[in-house]
Image: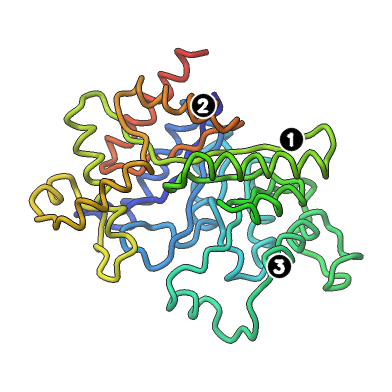
């Protein structure tokens, strides 16, 4: 099974952003040793418990500290930015680390005040499809047909980063298929039928537009495992508390420890919400988790699985990768 990683760069309780970045470097180095396909960094704004507000900056740090693993964004929220500037940033990374840079894009608006701040002075909302086409032309060096005539994106490099479209809807799937790009879909509590329908739509559209080619699908999911059930239970509790609080106005300033959550009185509403979120997480013993990942791969016809090891603690995150990699090696 092709396995990759999506990292939020969590800031754990009693830790700071510097420690979070240092840990991300250690984790990507371990992922490279364990032969994971790629390591992506998410983009989140005004989320105090993660340090990944600018994935392209984090990516360069990770690229500088590794040698072979693919490093990417999961993803740049393109609607907030100029495709020209994004192309410059990714071309710089590509120049420094040829054929190791991935650019995954999405178009989440983020919180209202964040959206306003990121889009200050803009007169109209950017069209996502136009922005994707802009990026394709910038990376291809196609200045003749670009809407900004005779514009070049520097530095000029011989290679270009592969592009990926992130999304959960048929609209995103259609855009990925139209542009001939891989499609990345996250398991966020949707029904099985909904996910299957979106992926099937992508495959059908891709093959219709690009005969004899079905495209490429990556399915991403939160994963929790450890070497004993007590730790698994603790890590799952802390993750579900994070998922519960992340969209609240009074979200926590850190990723809370299992002990913090145990000592906090949870309301019935919070407990019920945490139960509802269970379908967003793959959890269990290493073997159970791996079997569930295989089922996801088979059920959705995924070409690659991207795990989100968003569990509490540096040691636990490293162990999670080691355990999953061990199961993957056993199956080959």
Picture quadrant of residue 268? bottom left
Q: Nearer the viewer, mark 1 or mark 3?
A: 1
Which callout, 3 or 2, points at the residue further toward the start of the chain?
A: 2
Quadrant (top left/top right/bottom left/bottom right) for the N terminus: top right
As drawn, the label of residue 84 is: 3
- Whole-percent x and y of residue 49? 31, 58
Question: Whole-Å distance between the Cαs marked 2 and 1?
Answer: 26 Å
Which callout, 1 or 3, points at the residue further toward the start of the chain?
A: 3
Front-most of residues 45 and 151: 45
Picture quadrant of residue 303? top right
As drawn, the label of residue 35 is: 2
Q: Are marks 3 and 2 in contact (CB under 8 Å)?
A: no
Picture quadrant of residue 221? top left
- Whole-percent x and y of residue 325? 43, 23
The residue sitting at 70% across, 52% down in the picture is 174
As drawn, the label of residue 214 is: 1
């Amino acid at each position: 099974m092709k396995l990759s990683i999506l990292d939020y760069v969590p800031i754990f309780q009693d830790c700071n952003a510097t420690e979070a970045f240092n840990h991300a470097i250690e984790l990507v180095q371990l992922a490279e040793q364990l032969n994971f396909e790629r390591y992506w960094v998410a983009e989140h704004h005004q989320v105090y418990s993660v340090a990944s507000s600018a994935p392209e900056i984090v990516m360069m740090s990770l690229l500088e500290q590794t040698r072979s693993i693919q490093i990417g964004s999961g993803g740049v929220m393109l609607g907030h930015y100029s495709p020209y500037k994004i192309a410059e940033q990714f071309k710089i990374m590509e120049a420094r680390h040829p054929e190791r840079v991935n650019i995954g894009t999405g178009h989440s608006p983020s919180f209202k005040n964040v959206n306003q701040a990121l889009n200050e002075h803009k007169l109209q909302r950017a069209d996502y499809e136009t922005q994707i086409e802009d990026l394709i032309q910038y990376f291809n060096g196609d200045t003749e047909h670009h809407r900004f005539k005779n514009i070049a994106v520097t530095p000029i490099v011989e290679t270009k980063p592969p592009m990926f479209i992130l999304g959960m809807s048929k609209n995103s799937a259609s855009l990925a298929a139209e542009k001939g790009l891989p499609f990345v879909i996250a398991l966020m509590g949707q029904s099985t039928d909904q996910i299957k329908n979106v992926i099937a739509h992508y495959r059908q559209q891709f093959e219709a537009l690009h005969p004899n080619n079905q495209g490429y699908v990556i399915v991403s999911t939160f994963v929790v495992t450890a070497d004993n059930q007590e730790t698994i239970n603790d890590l799952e509790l802390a993750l579900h508390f994070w998922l519960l609080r992340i969209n609240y106005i009074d979200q926590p300033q850190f990723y809370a420890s299992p002990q913090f959550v145990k000592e906090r009185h949870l309301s019935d509403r919070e407990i019920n919400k945490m139960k509802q979120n269970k379908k967003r997480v793959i959890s269990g013993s290493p073997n159970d988790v791996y079997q569930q990942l295989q089922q996801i791969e088979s059920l959705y016809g995924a070409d690659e699985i991207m795990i989100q090891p968003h569990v509490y603690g540096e040691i636990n995150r490293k162990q999670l990768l080691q355990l999953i990699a061990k199961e993957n090696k056993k199956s080959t």
